[in-house]
Image (spheres, helix red, strand yellow):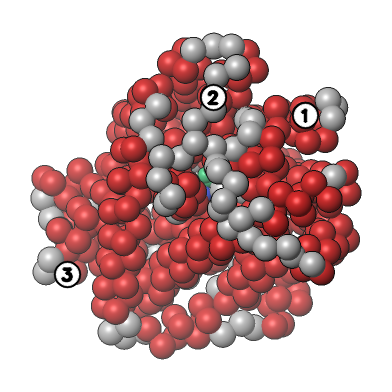
Amino acid sequence: MTQRETWATRTGFILAAVGSAVGLGNVWRFPFVTGEGGGAAFLLVYLLFVAMVGFPAILAEFVVGRKTKRNPVGALREYGGSAWKYVGGVFIVTGFVILSYYSVVAGWFVRYFLLGLTDSYAGHLAAYEEAAAGSEEVTESMVMFDTLATGLDSFLFHTLFMALTVGIVALGIRRGIELAVKVMVPAIIILLVGLAAWAATLPDAGAAYAYYLNPDFGVLASEWASILPAAAGQAFFTLSLGMGVMITYASYLGEDRNLAEDGTIIIGFDTAIAFIVGLVVFPIIISGGADPGQETVGAIFFSLTEAFAELGVGRWLGLLFFGTVAIAALSSAISILEVVTSYVIDEKGLERWQAALGMGGVIYLLGVPVTYDLIFLDLLDGFADGVLLVFGALVLMVLVGWIAPQVAVDELQKGIAPLGSLGDVWIWAIRVPLIVVLLVALYLGLVDYVEFLTGDFAGWVAATL
Ligand code: PHE
């Protein structure tokens, strides 16, 4: 067996993990699921979930990866016994599903970046003035999004983005990723903080903060059955948990790392970025007179094109912003394809380029329907987020909490210090409360998804065929 590569630099692992975590989940998905969940009530549950479930779960993936030094399927087989490899197989399926639509959405960001190259965002919006005239609810930015999000444009940019992802994974360029993340994460934070400061000056900023930051416990009490699974899915998605990314990345790790510290850094960056996105998006949406609950998958595009159209330097800000997010999405997409590819290389003995190209090709095809109609985005995203990721995380918790807890604690202690009773707290938190919460979230997520399949989706099929 050849020696397995390890991260070239001490920070290489953190950079790659942050690069995986920070992406469309923070910028694109977070604002619209928060809007659907009613704002502050959702934010509260999401933050609790990140801290109380996300943190123990990221540690669980780290220890399984570092202990076994394998791709997720091999890792679960070695850690839990041969039947567990089927569970690892679910991770691979999840990777296929997520990356297929992720690439389409990332393509939208590339498209919006290119808009800024040819004209100001105000200029682009003006072209849709007529189409949006005469309606109270529909704005130019919405018509523009609808035009670009499906059809030929969307298809071409999906193709481009997927080709880039496959190319990078096929060549196995790790150093490029580390550098990109070093530039991208600070750039995103600076841009977002600047935009949030501008958004604070908008007329309805106060109302937006109340909506986003002041939870209505009545809403929480009545809507918890939809908020809980949505918050769980969003937490796992944004932290890249529940499908083996962190197992894979930790498998290249030396034993001197303090995993708890690394986990805290990764979660801290990821959560901070999502949180600031909310401070940008909600003042713009609410000051524009729209209802954040109705904005759906275009929310970030509507609100930001309007902001960039209004600001004097908007064109440059837009270029920087959409460009940076596209790079952030690329580093996340790479991490997903890396899971699938490393599995095929390790378990099926293919060459890296064959594995990346073959798997990338199938994933690409799976994403094509999304460029045709956005109902397929709901079909794939709902399944991945509401069901697959929560299932993946649940299974890992059972493995670490019940099947081999001592191995996990021993592994976690390496690079830290003997944990004493903290190790027990971790295992017991996983064993009962976290597993129960995840079971409930999975059940509710399944119910929601079945409702979507038999409702909206069945309706679409009936209307289309
Ligand atoms: N965490 C990434 C994001 O927020 C998406 C992702 C999900 C990446 C699952 C890997 C695994 O954009």
Q: Percent x, y for residue 461?
A: 62, 32
Relative side of 440 to 40, left or right? right
Which is nearer the N-term, disc 2 or disc 3?
2
Which residue sits at x=88%, y=49%? 402
Nearest to viewer (mark 3 / mark 1): 1
Three-letter code for the amino acid on which mark 2 is drawn: Gln
Indicate left or right for 148 with 445 as reference.
left
- Can you see residue 285? no
Q: Which mark is residue 77?
A: 1
Q: Quadrant of the N terminus?
A: top right
Towards the viewer: 106 or 430:
430
Residue 45's quadrant in the figure?
bottom right
Q: Is residue 208 above or below residue 454?
A: below
Label 1 near label 2: C-beta < 8 Å?
no
Going 76% across and 77% down the picture, which residue do you hit?
221
Residue nearer the viewer, 11 or 313: 11
Q: Could you tell me which residue is drawn at 53 percent across and 81 percent down?
A: 213
Q: Amino acid at mark 1?
A: Arg
Name the residue nearer the viewer: 347 or 411.
411
The circle on residue 3 is: 2
User: Which residue is disc 3 drawn over?
Assistant: 311
> Tag 1, which secondary structure?
helix
The quarter of the image holding the C terminus is: top right
Decide which of 213, 263 is in the foreground and name it.
Answer: 263
Q: Residue at x 47, y 47 (%)?
A: 13
Query: Which residue is farthest bottom?
Result: 206
Q: Is residue 354 visible?
A: yes
